[in-house]
Image: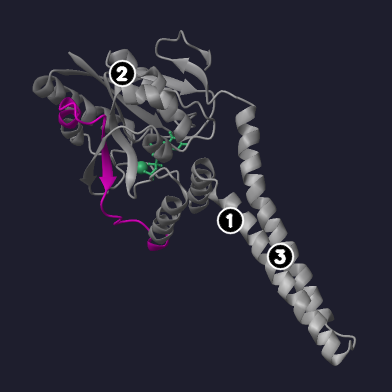
Amino acid sequence: MALISVVVPCYNEEAALPLFLDALRTTAAELRAGFDCETELVFVDDGSRDGTLSVLRGAARADSMVHYLSFSRNFGKEAAMFAGLQHARGDYVVIMDADLQHPPSMLREMVSVLRTGEYDCAAARRVSRTGEPPLRSFFSRRFYRLINRISDTEIVEGACDFRMMSRRMVDAILSLREYNRFSKGIFSWVGFRTKWLPFENQERVAGETKWSFWGLFVYAVQGIVGFSTVPLVLVALLGVLLCLGALLIVVYIIVKTLLFGDPVGGWPSMACMVMFMGGVQLFCMGILGEYLAKTYLEVKRRPIYVLSETDEDKKIGEF
Ligand code: UDP
Ligand code: MG
């Protein structure tokens, strides 16, 4: 009998969890009946401040299918997914949000795709962005266009973390131990054949989204820095272009001085040039700094998360 692990990162999902648990119990029964698969649920409490942990404790006590890990503080969804994948024991592992935005009914479809043996991953892909603020959709599209142009790793637009993977794909993902994790890139980087399953965006059942516009922006920058070094090349290119421009201006000034003499003047233009160059240099240093900062965080080799409690209560400590 195959085992399916459902990894669920949860941050302040007290309100949504009971509904999620109900839905997943139904789905687990369907999977057992239709596909001869057992299901385990691996919840990762990402340092929630509400009653998420006590809901999980109760669920684990009542139901042997439920397991949970709890972080010592909020480490972010990426860390929570990593921890969940590490602790999942299934032959197939699926990552799902706790807010039921990822329809559990799709699990059956995903299992059938993986069962064929042709694919190692069945991933959901949002086909519409209804219900999303137009400005956010606009910047999302720009982001995908940009990152796909400058990165060798393909980042599919609308792809979300809702995907079922084979054991060997999960092991490949776990072998990437980087601290700055950008899953959309990592899933694609490890390769393997992925089947895309379209789905409509669902409304959250309860609670609210944790993503602010600024949060998404920082996440986008992390994705670019993590999967492309093209910005560094662009900065170097910008330097070369500015040097060439400066050379042209030098020639122009020499010729002008020879022809018309050198009446004093040109201070305003000089001031503009100094400001412009100062700005360009700071901008380039900022880009360099972004890579340097990420390198700094990587070389510290800090653990990706710290556990404070699990349902087995054996593996407390750091990973
Ligand atoms: N999440 C998490 N840690 C965080 C933020 C979010 O584990 O720091 C979880 C959250 O509980 C949910 C999933 O990640 O299960 C997706 O979050 P959310 O619904 O806020 O994102 P959205 O669906 O709006 O993109
Ligand atoms: Mg959500």
- Image spot of residue 76 (x, y percent): 49, 34
Q: Position of residue 202 (x, y in %)?
A: 26, 47
Q: Are marks 3 and 1 in contact (CB under 8 Å)?
A: no
Q: Name the colour scheme.
A: one colour
> Where is 151 relative to 112, above or below?
below
Tell me the residue that label 3 is attached to: 243
Res 93 visible = yes
- Residue mark closest to the camera, 1 vs 2: 1
The circle on residue 66 is 2
Magenta span has 126? Answer: yes
Give the mark count: 3
Please tell me whether mark 3 sits on a helix, a strand or a loop. helix
Instruction: Tell me the element at label 1.
Output: helix
State the image coordinates of residue 114 (x, y, percent, origin top left). 20, 28
Q: What residue sits 50% from the left and 12% below the top?
A: 316
The mark lying in front, picked from 3 and 2, is 3
Q: Is residue 196 above or below residue 234?
A: above
Q: Which callout, 3 or 1, points at the residue further toward the start of the chain?
A: 1
Q: Which residue shows up at 63% across the image and 28% down it? A: 299
Under mark 2, the amino acid is Val
Q: Which residue is mark 1?
A: 234
Q: Measure the alpha-carbon separation of dots 3 and 2.
A: 63 Å
Read off the magenta span.
111-135
Mark 3 and mark 2 lie on one chain; the one further toward the N terminus is 2
Q: Is residue 207 magenta?
A: no
Three-letter code, disc 3: Cys
Residue 286's disc is: none
Asked if 133 appears above or below 253 in the picture, the reply is: above
